[in-house]
Image (cartoon, rainbow, N blue to C red):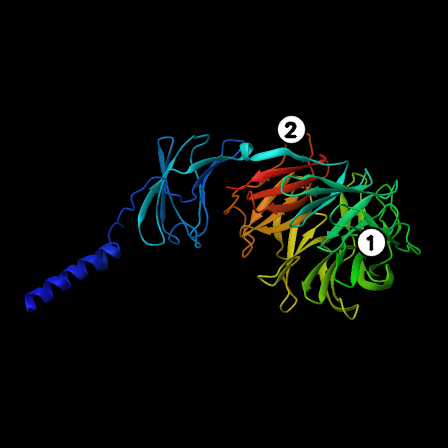
Amino acid sequence: MKRTYWILLIAMLLALSASCGGGVGGGAPPLDGGGNDGVALKLLTYADGTEWLIAPPNTAAPVTAVTVTAGGQTADGKSQADGSIVFKLPVTNEQSASATYITPQGLKRTVTPALHRVEEKLTHDFLPTGSAPNDMVLTAERAYVANSMDNNVAVLALPDFSPAGTLVLPAGASPSYLFVNEALGFVTCNGNNTLVAFNPADGAELWTVELESGDAAFLGPGRPWANAAYVFVPLANIAAFGGGGDETDYLPAELAVVSIADQTEAVRIELSGANAVDAVPVSATELAVAQAGNLSFDEDFRPFVTSPTFIDVVDTTALTVVRSVNLGVVGGSRLLHDSARARLLVGSITAGRMYTINTANWVIERGTLNPVILSDELTFVSDLLLAEGTLFVSSFNEDLVYALDPLTYNAGEWIMPEPLSLEQEELFLAGPQRLHYLAGSRSLLVLEGVANRAARYLLP
């Protein structure tokens, strides 16, 4: 009996030693069998031949050895802290590679990653649009494109983007920004200072409200947002345009509040700064409104600002400003609320910079002294999107879409270790204007305002 007990105990200890990769003394992890077994490793190849081995979080054990063999060369690295793999190959334009890594279960696995050529996954003319598309909004069943030079809003049925209707606007209306929910659609028109409500199913016009311009030479209605009772419209309020490098003169920024039931402007809220451009909800009853500051252009048409960016928080029930944050002279204009991390992200209209505010305590975390730097080139942040655990940021003048870690705001990680270039030919500006995520195809949809189209990129 005692002999049987010792045999069983020794067998158990041997099994435990194997499962722990060699027991107390360590040793090589056991093999997993290798081959392509469904693990999402990709050999990502860019147009210039640069190649990366990439894999999503939880693919490997955190911060463990990764060995890559390609083109007769072998290189060693480590997995990321989240278990993702982002490894730049020492060779270019290789058709295949092999990678060996440690799984989260402690097994040694060797795989042949699938080839993912960026150029082949990017369809430039995926969706032609009208002239000068300024905004695009997607719902579960429809896509909407505001074509500013065609004076219409195109309504497209998903998932195939087939025509479903058109909102035809007066000549010179210049539709600019959209908001659409299940009940109603709204478009602001900066050519005739109107807010137009339409049927989301087919774009049929329902009603129009003219926004009084008062002493403003250019009202500049921005991106609207609506709840069940009101539509909120940021107003730039330009008093006089500067020319030849002179500064543009602004009146105080305002937020127009339009009653949906009465179809009239109910109240106009004066804001803290100048040039209100964007509005996003930050809670069930609070709306953040970005005021970029006094925006002008020099003789070479380079944008500059001379007054601070304010982020005002408006109570959407009481219709009053309840909080204001001064970000400094940064040209903050594009907003995204990361509700999962309680952060308000602010993209600059004058530089490749992003700023962040903690919406739990309204403290500036990445401000003028430590902005998130995308680029030092002459460009601006045109849109921000959270998808696939990644923060995507479009840089207008560079024709690039950056991918950042939404926790650290670092680039060079999963899912795009290098920016996605939308450039199709030299001196051709696509002008990425709006970003959307298509879950069905796991792809980015990029509205290109200069190229009059939307491009689609299939993600790895």
Percent across and percent down for residue 101 are 35, 46
**Can residue 309 be seen from the camera position used here?**
no
Category of crowding for the residue at label 1, using alpha-carbon neighbours closer than 10 angstroms: few (below 14), some (14–19), many (at least 20)? many
**The residue tagged with tag 2: helix, strand or loop?**
loop
Percent across and percent down for residue 264 are 87, 60
Q: At label 1, which amino acid type do we have?
A: Ala
Residue at the image point whose x is 33% and y is 54% from the top: 105
In the displayed structure image, the side of residue 365 where residue 241 appears, left or right: right
Viewer-nearest residue: 219 or 33: 33
Viewer-nearest residue: 125 or 330: 125
Q: Quadrant of residue 160?
A: top right
Q: In the image as oriented, which residue stretches furthest toward the top?
A: 425
Q: At label 2, which amino acid type do we have?
A: Glu
Percent across and percent down for residue 361 are 63, 69
Q: Say which label, 1 or 2, has the lower sequence index.
A: 1
**Can residue 176 be seen from the camera position used here?**
yes
Residue at the image point whose x is 24% and y is 52% from the top: 27
Locate the N terminus and report the quarter of the image it occupies: bottom left
Percent across and percent down for residue 267 are 86, 64
The vertical placement of 262 against 118, above or below, is below
**To which residue does mark 2 refer?**
425
**To which residue does mark 1 refer?**
236
